[in-house]
Structure formats: structure tokens, C-alpha cells
Amino acid sequence: MKTMTCRQLGGACDETFSANTFEEIAEMSKNHGMEMFQKNDELHKKAMADMQKLMQSPNAMQEWFDNKRKEFDALPSN
């Protein structure tokens, strides 16, 4: 199991997520982002807007995703 923060995953806070795979942790981060968006959290809304800009370019989004996966893989297990 490995742990990353919302901020490490492109978000706006230090909430932590722990999972065995990058896909699991990415899903936790996504759900957290949606929850914060529904709560109208301005910092998370800005982070989501930045992510949406990144998603305009499939290559940029894939590169971001690959880099985050490498970061996850390099983390020590909890």
C-alpha cells in the first residue's frame, strides 16, 4: 500500500489517499475532487479547472498521468 496527497495528485489540499495501485488512488482522488467541487471549495475548483485545461491535449494528459504513475511507483510501501 502506498500513500499520496490530494496536492501530489494535482489537487489543492493535504488529504491523504492510500491504495495498492495507482488506479485505485487516482479514483479516490477523483471522488474527493468531486466532493470538494460539490462543496464549492474554491481551491479545489481551481485545481479542477487546471486539470480540465490539461485534458484539452490528449498527449499532455497522458504525460501527466504517466508521470504521476511513476511517482506512485517510486513511493515506499506503507
Image (cartoon, rainbow, N blue to C red):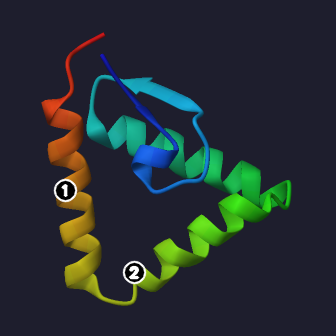
Q: Is residue 54 left or right of residue 36?
A: left
Q: Which residue is mark 2?
A: 55
Name the residue rendered at 70%, 67% in the picture. 45
The local crowd at label 2, few if under 14, some if 14 to 19, many if 20 or more residues have their Cα within 10 Å, is some
> Residue 9's mark?
none
Q: Front-most of 75 and 58?
A: 75
Residue at x 54% of width, y 54% of height: 11
Q: Nearer the viewer, residue 19 or 8?
A: 8
Q: Position of residue 59 (x, y in %)?
A: 19, 82
**Residue in front for this viewpoint, 20 or 11:** 11
Instruction: Quote the CA–CA distance across marks 2 and 1.
Output: 15 Å
Q: Is residue 30 depicted above or below 1 in this figure?
A: below
The residue identified by callout 1 is 67
Residue at far bottom of view: 56
Q: Nearer the viewer, mark 2 or mark 1?
A: 1
Helix or strand or loop: what does disc 1 sit on? Answer: helix
Q: Amino acid at mark 1?
A: Asn
Which amino acid does the dot numbered 2 rest on? Met
* Residue 46 vertical placement versus 78 (above, below): below
Where residue 52 appears, as percent x and y from the top left, is 50, 79
Who's the residue at 15% across and 34% down the image? 73
Tell whether 57 sits left or right of 30: left
